[in-house]
């Protein structure tokens, strides 16, 4: 996009790429992004902090985004979330003690007909019951390490 | 039972419409081939205007009119596709992106040709990773097949499509916030005027259109404006995808003719309520819309009929709630959404949303007071209509509609010091 | 400035605001139109100097025929508009916004620095909610966030109006202060929580409508209603910003902008704002000092004056006396100083110039600061406005950002500028030649055809409608070549102008008052033979040809280019009297030191770089034995039996100066005569063959350098840089310089220790050394040209921390 306007249009794609490499937007990535786009480190951080899919701090290898908005709530999201928190030993927004799982309750994921739904590293899982979650958890644990949020 | 023959979703679920050949077999690219050979940009705009197509992104602005606003001053123009769908209860663009991306591409090229756009940008919500991958594959297939790129079908018109992935912010669905986001900034809505038609992306004239709006274009051009305008009420005609969710038998996306009574959608398409339940409230147009109730089921699903009921068609997210649902909790969930997604520029939206959310949490936890109810009943006057963008004005409509309809339910949360629906589990964990 | 806005065009439209009809230019913002109608609409995010953003929503008003309330700060008037600014609906909306803002506000007004002048407090009083509904428990955010050397931030008080971040973006264009996070979680902050470093930071505390941003220099010291105000003018640099000094019980508490659109546009820099607490430090001189062997001991004013008279008298009679100073005095005092030299001491040996500046004013094409606003091209050489004239630089930044002014910087090293600029690398000695070439190219109309960078610059000049040159008056050759170039351009109907950045705050005033050896007040040629320049006086003193020097408000030991010569002179001269506020490097060598009053402690006039004479008032009384320079000069004159020659009264002195000036005006012809120039011409910077460790030394200015007030002020101390030298990465690799290590630079006049820095702004073979740092006086390495050479080696002394470790081990 940079070719169309100014260099700053490349900022978010660049940050997404950095996050894919490092798991989150490191201070180095902030400086690199600032140098690339001609804005200040402060401005980069301001922008990073605005977007919920850009992380300013280290996160787990597995990121669980569980929808908490109305349709999912009507479909039993509260019960699911309580279960997930207990299973992972975390509160909303936290990373499990082993550093593997970051759990975040998020807003409507546009899959309301398959409530409650969640995303694991941006992959959808639909109609998730607590039992289904436990099963998923086992498969995730068995997965090899990779970028948490693939940027493409 | 449903008799309407689907237009936008024809073949969805049966054919692999991400495949160029399959899409063509389904009637795809006919409009594009016809338009690039036989139609001038002006005649396309005229056709779209005549069809009375209104934007499917929520505001319902007539598409042909929007295109006509572009100043004729020779500056390069941008067409931006809004695929940032995040309105609570809405999941139609998500489906269109994944199931029939070539239809979107065809609509994009046609619209770009019509407004003579120099560049096309598709803003895909960051969470739609799978949709993004599908779209990119479809895009390169379309490019290979000569439907995207230079000198399309020998017409001399060139158009390429750039894709920007969102990074997590509902407010970027608001068109000026989206432009800021594409420019690499915080997604904060701009002060208007100037409007995007005059000063949009990188300060250039810009049109922002919703995915579903763009998907309508090929059909209008193949089957004619008159056909389109004849579906449903003349002032808001056409096929419309409604995302039905909540407490119904068969949640899902349903393509209906505009104007279909809400009750028919609920009964005939979505299979009705769960056994033994009665209807309590429906949010007919996404999380920003006020509720309608059992007595409103005859209301047609279209812009004007719903507006007459003090609510809106909005994005077409149709969320059904039955008698087991606590209205305090439902409102709290939605207000929390707006609180979390507010960009924070405006005082009323930023502070008011947060205040109302705290009050509802308190009520639901059994710690509310009469003073809290008083605030809920009066805060609309200062919270709604005082903000820079429509998000701030979306916090109250649902809450206010159910508060007016079920005042005793709210009061009970105070007198019982807890939620009457689930007294054992004062909700709000986290 | 309103000119930055989509122009409020000339066409007038009729509007009715709260029942009163008026006619205002079409496009005026409703909020501004309301002011004209005598109504005020409350605002938080709106600031007349910045683009409207419409965030806070406090300014909602009712406009007939528009269903929704509209924001007065971003809505423009149209013909027939009827506005209600205090209807029921408006009152309700306002009330609502205030209620929302107060919801999580800590309401700690009694301990808030803004108490008494806070817009949240004020508007709540005038329009606000009964606090009854605000029983909500407060959400907490960080309080007392340390934002760096000058500012403390209270996030709980912050109402997120973003004036501060927008100031840093739109006005300072530095963009380091930003909004972090979103929604009600938003915070004001910096990258990685680092310090907010800006020469303009103090302005944010003024424009913050609440007590969220406060100055460290002022925190919890006084309440606004207890303060006494005095209108003053900053004399820290030659821009001459207007400001107000607020004091309490005779002590300065803070300073505040006093908008003068043509000079400061309502801003002041942090050096101007914060340099006042040195007055209350023990290092501030309060008693006269007299030399007793190696020491200076306190004495009485009379004794000091008597000794001066005793030593100066014979020296004057022998014609072996000199006077240095004037650029840090008021106009009246500069006049008094030269009168003292000429009439009391009978010599033309008087010079205000201690830096390399030769002229403080342009001989032709004098420009005003506001000429920068619509300049098409600004040509800067020698002067470096970001460090030497910050508020002028702000004007320049805005012109570049808003009016597409091109900034062209010619000099020996790449400057660090916050706005886009074209950099032309050129050795100072060759700039005259460049100007001549440019003049020829323009004159011969070769701007289109020629190639090479001279033609390229000439082309830009030819295409520029209005050209303003900014220089430092150092190099007479380049200045006269510039005049020729501008004359040529003016001949082709370009508008041209020149601004000379003064080396001292009142350099131009001193020059005009006659503190130069060949010109009297008003640039009239002085009677008798021209006297010696500062360089000549120092040379003579060093050689034993002068018996006495009187120095007022100058520190040649640190700032004169040839530091070795200056120190030799000051050590050798038999009698040295110095008038100063703190014990500078020069005062420390004196036989008599008079403590002098600061600008806040006297009144008078100063003349800024554009030649504008401005009055400043007295804010506080000086300590008992501290006199103004005028009083000191009069005291010494009286002791010498010349009571009538020099009055101590500012009014009388000004009258004398004005009389002298008007007489001079009649006698001076077309061109103002030039001040006498030192024999030494700036040499071309010879780039030393870069195979060994010898480097060309170029001193670089810094806003907080100098050995005077700023060096002793607790407010500015944290902002002072540590002495450093920057070398090119290539050189660093070649001679093994590591950033951060200590280096010793050894030159002709001695050696200094500095911190090593590596950066591309230093050309190969050059070390850029921070100038005027008392800890490491760069002038030890320089000669009279202002440049020098030095060899670089690793410092022998072990860095401090390590030696401490060793002690504790
Ligand atoms: C808070 C907010 C969120 C919005 N989100 C979306 C969205 O996700 N998708 C969309 O198409 N339009 C959204 N809109 C509407 C857009 O601003 C814009 O009106 C629309 O994209 C125009 O396209 P249309 O004319 O084709 O409907 C949103 C508006 C607001 C105020
Ligand atoms: S209404 Fe809310 S989301 Fe919209 S601009 Fe204002 S604060 Fe941001
Ligand atoms: S710190 Fe002050 S100026 Fe900055 S946003 Fe907060 S209230 Fe406004
Ligand atoms: S720019 Fe100069 S005159 Fe203005 S405040 Fe700063 S130091 Fe003082
Ligand atoms: S509410 Fe959960 S996906 Fe929409
Ligand atoms: S002053 Fe108008 S919105 Fe802030």
Image: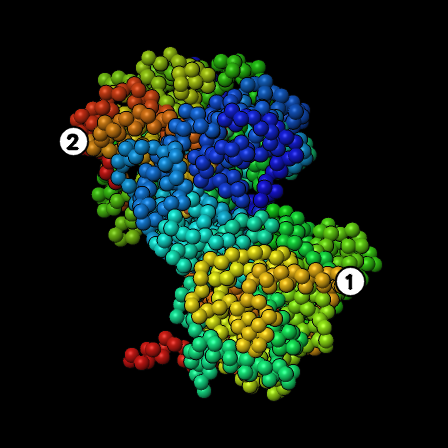
The secondary structure type at the circle numbered 1 is loop
Q: CA distance from mark 2 to mark 1?
A: 99 Å
Displayed quadrant of residue C250: bottom left
Residue displayed at 46% across by 38% down: C43
Residue B428 visible to an observer of this rendering: yes
Nearest to the observer: residue C48 or residue B374 = C48
- Residue C413: horizontal and vertical position, in percent? 61, 67
Residue identifier under label 1 = C669
**Which chain letter goes with mark 2?**
B
The secondary structure type at the circle numbered 2 is loop
- Residue C780: horizontal and vertical position, in percent? 55, 79
- Residue C350: horizontal and vertical position, in percent? 63, 74
Q: Nearer the viewer, mark 2 or mark 1?
A: 1
- Relative height, residue C116 to residue C795 (above, below): above
**Does residue C226 appear left or right of residue B185 in this picture?**
left
User: Which of the image's four quarters has the N terminus of chain B?
Assistant: top left
Displayed quadrant of residue C412: bottom right
Mark 2 Cβ inside 8 Å of ligand 5:
no
- Relative height, residue C346 to residue B278 (above, below): below
Residue displayed at 62% across by 24% down: B44
Residue displayed at 28% across by 41% down: C138
Q: Badge 2, how many Cα within 10 Å: few under 14, some, many 20+? A: few
User: Which of the image's four quarters has the C terminus of chain B?
Assistant: top left
Q: Badge 1, how many Cα within 10 Å: few under 14, some, many 20+? A: few
Residue identifier under label 2 = B424
Task: State whether discs 2 and 1 lie on one chain.
Answer: no
Residue C727 visible to an observer of this rendering: no
- Residue A11: horizontal and vertical position, in percent? 50, 48
């Amino acid at each position: 996009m940079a070719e169309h306007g100014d260099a700053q249009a490349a900022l978010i794609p660049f940050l997404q790429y950095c996050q894919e490499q490092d798991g989150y937007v490191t201070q180095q990535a902030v400086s690199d992004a600032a140098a690339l786009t001609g804005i200040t480190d402060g401005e980069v951080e301001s922008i990073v902090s605005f977007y919920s899919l850009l992380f300013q701090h280290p996160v787990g290898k597995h990121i669980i985004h569980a929808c908490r908005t109305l349709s999912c709530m009507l479909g039993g999201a509260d019960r699911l979330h309580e279960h997930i928190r207990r299973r992972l030993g975390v509160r909303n927004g936290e990373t499990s003690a082993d550093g593997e799982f970051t759990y975040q309750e998020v807003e409507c994921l546009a899959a309301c007909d398959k409530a409650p739904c969640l995303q694991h590293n941006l992959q959808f899982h639909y109609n998730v019951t607590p039992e289904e979650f436990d099963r998923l958890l086992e498969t995730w644990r068995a997965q090899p390490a990779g970028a948490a949020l693939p940027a493409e | 039972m449903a008799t309407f023959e689907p237009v936008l979703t024809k073949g969805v679920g049966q054919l692999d419409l991400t495949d160029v050949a399959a899409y063509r077999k389904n009637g795809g690219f006919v409009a594009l081939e016809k338009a690039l050979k036989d139609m001038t940009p002006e005649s396309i705009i005229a056709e779209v205007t005549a069809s009375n197509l209104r934007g499917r992104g929520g505001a319902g602005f007539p598409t042909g009119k929007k295109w006509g606003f572009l100043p004729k001053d020779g500056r390069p123009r941008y067409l931006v596709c809004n695929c940032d769908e995040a309105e609570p209860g809405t999941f139609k663009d998500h489906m269109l992106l994944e199931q029939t991306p070539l239809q979107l591409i065809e609509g994009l090229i046609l619209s770009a040709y019509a407004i003579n756009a120099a560049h096309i940008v598709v803003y895909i919500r960051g969470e739609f990773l799978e949709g993004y991958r599908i779209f990119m594959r479809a895009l390169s297939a379309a490019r290979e097949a000569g439907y995207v790129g230079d000198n399309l079908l020998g017409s001399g018109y060139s158009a390429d499509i750039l894709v920007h992935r969102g990074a997590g912010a509902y407010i970027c669905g608001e068109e000026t916030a989206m432009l800021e986001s594409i420019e690499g900034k915080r997604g904060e809505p701009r002060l208007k005027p100037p409007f995007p038609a005059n000063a949009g992306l990188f300060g250039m004239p810009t049109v922002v259109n919703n995915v579903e709006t763009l998907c309508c274009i090929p059909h209008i051009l193949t089957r004619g404006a008159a056909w389109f305008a004849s579906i449903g009420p003349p002032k808001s005609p056409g096929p419309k995808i409604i995302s039905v969710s909540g407490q119904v038998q068969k949640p899902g996306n349903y393509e209906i003719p505009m104007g279909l009574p809400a009750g028919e959608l609920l009964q005939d398409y979505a299979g009705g309520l769960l056994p033994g339940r009665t209807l309590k409230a429906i949010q007919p147009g996404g999380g920003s819309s006020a509720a309608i109730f059992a007595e409103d089921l005859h209301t047609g699903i279209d812009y004007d009929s719903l507006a007459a009921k003090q609510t809106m068609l909005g994005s077409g997210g149709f969320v059904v709630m039955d008698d087991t649902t606590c209205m305090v909790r439902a409102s709290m969930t939605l207000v929390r959404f707006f609180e979390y997604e507010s960009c924070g520029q405006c005082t009323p939206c930023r502070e008011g949303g947060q205040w109302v959310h705290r009050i509802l949490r308190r009520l639901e936890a059994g710690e509310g007071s009469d003073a809290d109810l008083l605030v809920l009943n009066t805060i609309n006057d200062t919270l709604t209509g005082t903000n820079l963008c429509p998000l701030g004005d979306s916090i109250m409509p649902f809450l206010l509609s159910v508060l007016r309809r079920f005042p005793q339910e709210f009061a009970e949360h105070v007198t019982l010091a807890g939620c009457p629906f689930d007294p054992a589990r004062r909700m709000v964990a986290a | 400035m309103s000119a930055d806005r989509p122009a409020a065009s000339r066409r007038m439209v009729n509007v009715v605001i709260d029942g009163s009809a008026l006619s205002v230019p079409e496009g005026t913002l409703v909020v501004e139109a309301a002011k004209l109608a005598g109504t005020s609409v409350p605002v938080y995010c709106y600031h007349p100097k910045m683009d409207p953003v419409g965030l806070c929503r406090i300014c909602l008003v009712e406009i007939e025929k528009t269903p929704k309330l509209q924001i007065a700060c971003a809505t423009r008037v149209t013909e027939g508009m009827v506005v209600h600014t205090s209807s029921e609906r408006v009152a309700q909306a306002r009330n609502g916004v205030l209620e929302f803002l107060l919801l999580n506000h800590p309401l700690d007004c009694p301990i808030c620095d803004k108490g008494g002048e806070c817009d949240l407090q004020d508007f709540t009083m005038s329009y606000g909610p009964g606090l009854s509904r605000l029983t909500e428990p407060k959400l907490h955010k960080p309080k007392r966030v340390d934002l760096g050397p000058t500012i403390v931030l209270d996030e709980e008080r912050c109402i997120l109006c973003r004036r501060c971040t927008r100031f840093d973006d739109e006005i300072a264009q530095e963009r380091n202060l930003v909004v972090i996070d979103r929604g009600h979680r938003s915070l004001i902050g910096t990258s990685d929580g680092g310090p907010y470093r800006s020469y303009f930071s103090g302005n944010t505390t003024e424009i913050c409508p609440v007590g969220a941003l406060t100055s460290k220099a002022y925190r919890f010291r006084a309440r606004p209603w207890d303060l006494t105000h005095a209108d003053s003018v900053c004399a820290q640099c030659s821009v001459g910003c207007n400001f107000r000094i607020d004091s309490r019980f005779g002590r300065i508490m803070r300073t505040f902008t006093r908008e003068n659109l043509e000079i400061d546009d309502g801003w002041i820099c942090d050096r101007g704002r914060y340099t006042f607490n040195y007055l209350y430090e023990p290092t501030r001189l309060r008693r006269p000092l007299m030399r007793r062997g190696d020491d200076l001991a306190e004495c009485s004013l009379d004794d000091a004056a008597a000794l001066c008279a005793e030593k100066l008298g014979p020296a004057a009679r022998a014609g072996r006396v000199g006077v240095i100073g004037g650029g840090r005095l008021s106009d009246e005092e500069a006049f008094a100083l030269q009168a003292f030299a000429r009439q009391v001491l009978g010599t033309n040996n008087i010079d205000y110039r201690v830096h390399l500046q030769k002229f403080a004013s342009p001989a032709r094409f004098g420009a005003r600061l506001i000429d920068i606003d619509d300049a098409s091209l600004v040509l800067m050489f020698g002067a470096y406005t970001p460090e030497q004239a910050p508020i002028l630089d702000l004007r320049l930044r805005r012109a570049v950002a808003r009016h597409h002014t091109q900034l062209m910087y010619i000099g020996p090293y790449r400057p660090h500028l916050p706005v886009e600029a074209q950099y032309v690398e050129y050795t100072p000695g060759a700039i005259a030649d460049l100007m001549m070439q440019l003049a020829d190219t323009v004159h011969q109309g070769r701007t289109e055809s020629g190639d090479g960078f001279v033609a390229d610059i000439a082309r830009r000049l030819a295409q520029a409608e209005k050209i303003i040159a900014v220089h430092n008056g150092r190099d007479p050759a380049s200045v006269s070549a510039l005049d020729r170039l501008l004359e040529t351009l003016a001949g082709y109907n370009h508008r041209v102008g020149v601004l000379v950045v003064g080396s001292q705050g009142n350099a131009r005033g001193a020059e005009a008052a006659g503190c130069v050896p060949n010109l009297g007040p008003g640039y009239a040629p002085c009677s008798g033979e021209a006297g010696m320049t500062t360089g000549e006086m120092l040379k003579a003193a060093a050689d034993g040809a002068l018996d006495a020097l009187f120095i007022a408000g100058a520190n040649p030991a640190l700032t004169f280019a040839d530091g070795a010569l200056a120190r030799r002179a000051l050590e050798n001269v038999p009698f040295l009297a110095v008038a100063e506020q703190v014990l500078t490097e020069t005062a420390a060598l004196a036989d008599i030191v008079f403590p002098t009053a600061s600008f806040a402690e006297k009144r008078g006039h100063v003349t800024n770089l554009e030649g504008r004479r401005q009055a400043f008032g007295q804010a506080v009384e000086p300590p008992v034995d501290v006199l103004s320079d005028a009083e000191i000069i009069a005291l010494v004159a009286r002791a010498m039996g010349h009571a009538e020659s020099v009055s101590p009264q500012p009014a009388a002195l000004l009258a004398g100066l004005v009389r002298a000036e008007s007489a001079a005006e009649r006698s001076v012809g077309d061109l103002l005569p030039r001040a006498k120039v030192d024999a030494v011409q700036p040499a071309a910077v010879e780039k030393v063959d870069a195979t060994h460790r010898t480097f060309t030394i170029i001193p670089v200015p810094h806003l907080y350098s100098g050995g005077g007030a700023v060096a002793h002020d607790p407010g500015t101390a944290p902002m002072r840089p540590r002495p450093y030298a920057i070398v090119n990465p290539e050189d660093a690799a070649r001679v093994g310089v590591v950033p951060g290590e200590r280096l010793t630079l050894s030159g002709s006049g001695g050696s200094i220790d500095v911190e090593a820095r590596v950066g591309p702004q230093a050309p190969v073979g050059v070390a850029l050394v921070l100038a005027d740092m008392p800890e490491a006086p760069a002038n030890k390495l320089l000669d009279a040209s202002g440049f020098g050479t030095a060899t670089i080696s690793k410092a022998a002394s072990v860095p401090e921390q390590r030696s401490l470790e060793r002690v504790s081990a």
